[in-house]
Amino acid sequence: MNLYLRYFDNEILVHSVKEAIDFLASIPDINMTPELEADIRNYALSDVFYPKRYKVRSRIYFIIIKTLAETMLDFKQKKAVHPNIAAGNNGNNNPRQSSADMVINKLCEERQGWYEGELDFKRVVMVPSTGKFEYRDTKFVARCKANSGMDCYNRIIENLHDRVDSRSQFPSAKGKNFHFKYLGMWK
């Protein structure tokens, strides 16, 4: 595991904690204390992979980032990714992309019948005591005849547009605030 360190325009990619401490000690603004040195060593040995920021003085910091990159060019081009991230995507370039594709495919799958759709949205309501309006989280559940999950979503939104304040905010069909299930074929 290598370490990337940066303090303003001073940056370096080192292969050991000793090199990192020597680099920081060479910068006059940074006061290397035994506590700081111990903390850097602990960070390098830990399983933590997020960047660590150390305060030099008010609003002035230096950062340390763990990386698998062997050269500064590899680091800058983001060629070395964290091993857990690389192992977790099962050959896909972007795991979020594949799950988003899966949601879209499920939404658009043509299957005529009854659907139950559940939508969490921000509804605009008037507070009687003040006469002002506010957003309230509202759960709406409806059963409808539809051709797909997307058709179910569109029918629910169309129904709500006619019945709630036009300033209400509806979520995307692809988001976590819309769920549906297929109940069966209609007669």
Image (tube, rainbow, N blue to C red):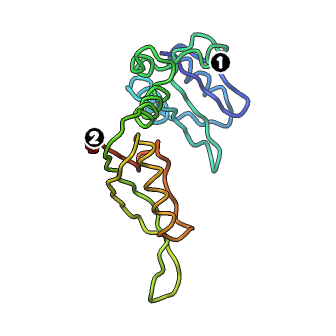
Query: Does residue 142 sit above or below 77 in this rendering?
Result: below
Query: Does residue 6 sit above or below 154 in this rendering?
Result: above
Pointer 1: what residue? Answer: 77
Identity, as a three-letter code, of the amino acid under mark 2 = Met
Q: Residue at x 73, y 30 (%)?
A: 9
Q: Residue at x 62, y 47 (%)?
A: 57
Identity, as a three-letter code, of the amino acid under mark 1 = Gln
Give coordinates of residue 88: x percent, y percent.
Answer: 39, 21
Q: Residue furthest front?
A: 187
Nearer to us in this view, 21 or 138: 138
Q: Earlier in the sequence, mark 2 or mark 1?
A: 1
Nearer to us in this view, 145 or 150: 145
Q: How packed is label 2: few (under 14 Cα within 10 Å), some, or many (20 or more)?
A: few
Q: Residue furthest bottom?
A: 129
The label on residue 185 is 2
The label on residue 174 is none
Q: Secondary structure at mark 2?
A: loop
Nearer the camera: disc 2 or disc 1: 2
Q: What's the CA distance linking mark 2 and mark 1?
A: 53 Å
Give coordinates of residue 187: x percent, y percent.
Answer: 26, 45
